[in-house]
Amino acid sequence: PIVSKSFYDLSLKSDACIQNAGGVRIAINPGDVTYGTAYTLLPFANTLFEITMKGSEIKQVLEDALVAAIDKKSTGSFPYAYGLRYDIDTTKAANQRVSNLEIKNRSSGAWGAIEEGKMYVVVTNSFTAQGQDGYTTFKTVQDARGKGVDTYLDYAMSFVKYMEALTKDGKKLTKLPSSDHPIKSYK
């Protein structure tokens, strides 16, 4: 989730971020975080990619990722996010596992139910934006309405910028507060 927050912070147009678990390769241990750490954490040549989507399509992206993770046993597909919160119930049938989906208002910080027909901007990495790792709705949305925006911002640099902002403010890297964690409950 902290990687998702770093993407969200660098993508000033996004309402939310969705990131596949497999795109993040290491845990960050206490101590110094270097450029090398960032590029080991996020080692691929991905960029930040923004896609305009309906609220219902955002829910479907999360459902797609869970189908890949749970039903197809893809270890990298599990969805993490920032600016989104949701409940997951793995005992339910495919495409019915995500509920109580909320989105955080970027300006006010207030949480509210996502509106199915409203358009939002979601930032992700350029790999999942192509529908890879089970994130098929990212691709079908772009096939239907036109390609999203490749920002050409290096996704590992988003984490570097996040760390630089923390350091400048005299803060240390910590887990997100529970109020910002994407998974409200997991069954």
Image (cartoon, rainbow, N blue to C red):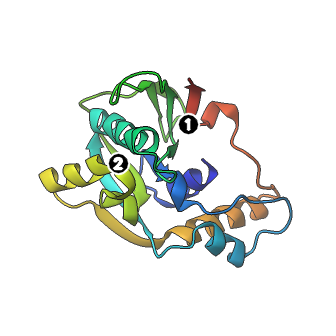
Nearer-the-camera pick, 155 or 140: 140
Image coords of residue 60 (percent x, y): 31, 37
CA gap, disc 1 to disc 2? 17 Å
Residue drawn 38% across and 39% down?
67
143 vs 161: above or below: above
- Outermost left residue: 144
Residue 156 is tagged as none
What residue is disc 1 on?
182
Local crowd size for mark 2, using a 10 Å CA cut-off: few (<14), some (14–19), many (≥20):
many
Please name the amino acid that badge 2 sits on.
Answer: Val
Q: Is residue 13 visible?
A: no
Image coords of residue 79 (percent x, y): 48, 44
Residue drawn 70% across and 63% down?
163
Marks 1 and 2, the one that precedes in the sequence: 2
Residue drawn 34% across and 50% down?
135
Residue drawn 50% across and 54% down?
76
What residue is disc 2 on?
121
Nearer-the-camera pick, 43 or 13: 43
